[in-house]
Amino acid sequence: MVKATQLRPGMIIQHDGDLYAIFSVDHRTPGNKRGSMQTKMRNLRTGSIVDHRFRAEEFLERAILDEVEYEFLYGDADGYHFMNQQTYEQIALTKELLGETVDYLIPNLPVKVEFHEGKAIGVLLPDTVDMTVVDTEPSIQKATASAVMKPAKLETGLVINVPPFVGTGDKVRVDTTEGRYVQRVQ
């Protein structure tokens, strides 16, 4: 059990018989009234986003998840295929279940698949992923690091802003939590 004031983004809780992933939390204390936690959560079964207000003193049940090391293999019409690192067993997860994480899935990427009661409910990505730029404006000669950024399309279709010296074919490190450029990789 966890107190409502201890809720953090990324936590998974059980609420009204379903599992919810916490997206955002805002602690509100309006004047002389009791404090509350305004949360935005995603139902892991239906995928719907819900706004809910918990009383500050309320206790919630935190879901117990198993994390298993998997390797992303490929994506096709049937879904996204992963292989267990120890047993070599393969599973396929749908785009609806994975959500925005599919933008960072490149072949041979090690990930952790989260299971609840034997059923896969999500994927934990590494903090950064090295990806290849497939389309961007031409590099500017003698460009220095500046605040000016340009859009670049990566191998998975994800579009991020990169500095002007990054060109097509370059490998870049991308932060998976914010979806932003970190550095160019040699």
Image (cartoon, rainbow, N blue to C red):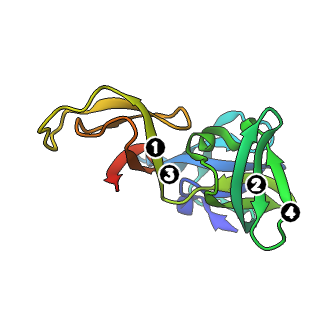
**Residue 58 visible in the shown view:** yes
The first of marks 3 and 4 along the sequence is: 3
From the image, tell me which residue sits under label 2.
82
Answer left or right for 84 relative to 34: right
Label number found at residue 132: 1
Graded by Cα atoms within 10 Å as few (under 14), some (14 to 19) or many (20 or more), the crowding at tag 2 reads many
Residue type highlighted by circle 4: Glu
- Total numbered labels placed on residues in the image: 4
Label number found at residue 120: none
Graded by Cα atoms within 10 Å as few (under 14), some (14 to 19) or many (20 or more), the crowding at tag 3 reads some
Secondary element at image label 4: loop
The first of marks 1 and 2 along the sequence is: 2
Looking at this view, is 46 or 115 the one in front?
A: 115
From the image, tell me which residue sits under label 3.
35
From the image, tell me which residue sits under label 4.
89
The first of marks 4 and 1 along the sequence is: 4
**Residue 52 visible in the shown view:** no
Residue type highlighted by circle 1: Thr
The first of marks 3 and 1 along the sequence is: 3
Q: CA distance from mark 4 to mark 1?
A: 28 Å
Looking at this view, is 42 or 151 the one in front?
A: 151
Secondary element at image label 2: strand
Graded by Cα atoms within 10 Å as few (under 14), some (14 to 19) or many (20 or more), the crowding at tag 1 reads many
Q: CA distance from mark 1 to mark 2?
A: 21 Å
Q: CA distance from mark 3 to mark 4?
A: 48 Å
Percent across and percent down for residue 131 are 47, 47
4 vs 1, front mark = 1
Q: CA distance from mark 2 to mark 3?
A: 43 Å
Residue type highlighted by circle 2: Phe
Q: CA distance from mark 4 to mark 2?
A: 8 Å
- Quarter of the image with the C terminus in it: bottom left
Percent across and percent down for residue 9 are 54, 53
